[in-house]
Amino acid sequence: MRANANAPVIIKRVKKVSGGGHHGGAWKVAYADFVTAMMAFFLLMWLLNATTEKQRKGIADYFNPTIPVTRVSGGGDGSFGGDSVFVEETLSQTGNGGVPRDPGLTEGGMADDAATENARLEELNEMLFARGGESMASDGIARHIVTRVTDEGLLVELFDLDGAPLFEPNTTTPTAVLSELTGMIARVFTLVENGVAIEGHVATQPVVVIENTAWDLSTGRATQLRKMFEDGALAPERITRVTGHADREPAVANAMAIRNNRIELILLRSGQ
């Protein structure tokens, strides 16, 4: 009998791990997350550099919307007869209750009122300047008029032309052209009740003159037009201001041009 016949049998098992170590796929997921985060970071940097402050605020508001919540009673038979202490008429002393009121949006709304007034001013503008059909101004005097609707109201600009001034040279004496213009404009202005502002402007005088009369002349001409309006059909209380600007606001680049001799009439918007 052999000596090693009863020796134990040793079986060596080798455990194979497929995909283990650096050959696994877990690191790929982590790397993909890292690349995605870096891409988002560089995209953020690009947006901060390529957008304005207003655009950035719009983007921030998109991701962080603000939903207004008002605390108004739904009604009922409680102590306040269907109201709570947070309704508009009985605001809480903390100042947090109620729906804020915009006085401009009541009784038709400020937007509607502004649109109506704009339409009315445009209608008067058409009447003066003949863009909507028959004009109240004849061809002879219409060339002295420039009109436009501004934030302040309807601006009617009356200006000198070569050989056809509105005032006698260097005086406040109106010519026949200005008298006709004033009468026509006064008739149009009586169609509404808005206030009227009168502003006088003159061209720059030569430096060789002994006394510069630009201030007195512009103010005197504006005052003269006020008197002509008041003597006509326009109520005196509708004149809200009379101003002389001398040669400080030229209408054209050449400060000495005759075009700078002008009177600006502003049919003011309501409330001004």
Image (tube, rainbow, N blue to C red):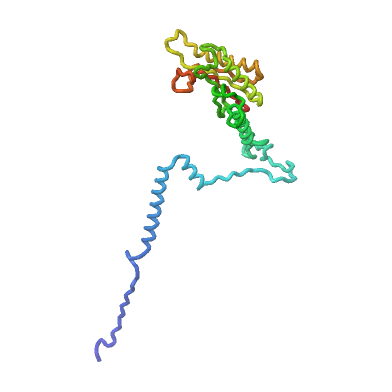
Residue at the limit of the structure toward the left, as seen here: 2
Q: Nearer the viewer, residue 270 or 27?
A: 270
Instruction: Give how far across and how far down residue 178 sits, in percent.
Output: 58, 17
Quadrant where the C terminus sits is top right
Relative to residue 209, is residue 137 drawn left or right? right
Name the quadrant containing residue 85. top right
Query: What residue is rendered at 30% in x and 83% in y?
Result: 9
Is 87 drawn above or below residue 203 in the view shown?
below
Query: What residue is rendered at 71% in x and 45% in y?
Result: 75
Q: Nearer the viewer, residue 270 or 212?
A: 212
Instruction: Give how far across and how far down residue 219 sits, in percent.
Output: 54, 14
Name the quadrant containing residue 86. top right
Q: Nearer the viewer, residue 187 or 152?
A: 187
Q: Nearer the viewer, residue 52 or 11?
A: 52
Q: Exactly how many numbered labels are in the figure? A: 0
Relative to residue 122, is residue 18 drawn left or right? left
Relative to residue 1, is residue 232 drawn left or right? right
Quadrant where the N terminus sits is bottom left
Query: What residue is rendered at 57% in x and 17% in y?
Result: 177
Is 134 drawn above or below residue 198 in the view shown?
below
Is 204 drawn above or below residue 136 in the view shown?
above
Instruction: Give how far across and how far down residue 160 sits, in percent.
Output: 52, 19
Instruction: Give how far across and how far down residue 246 sits, in percent.
Output: 50, 16
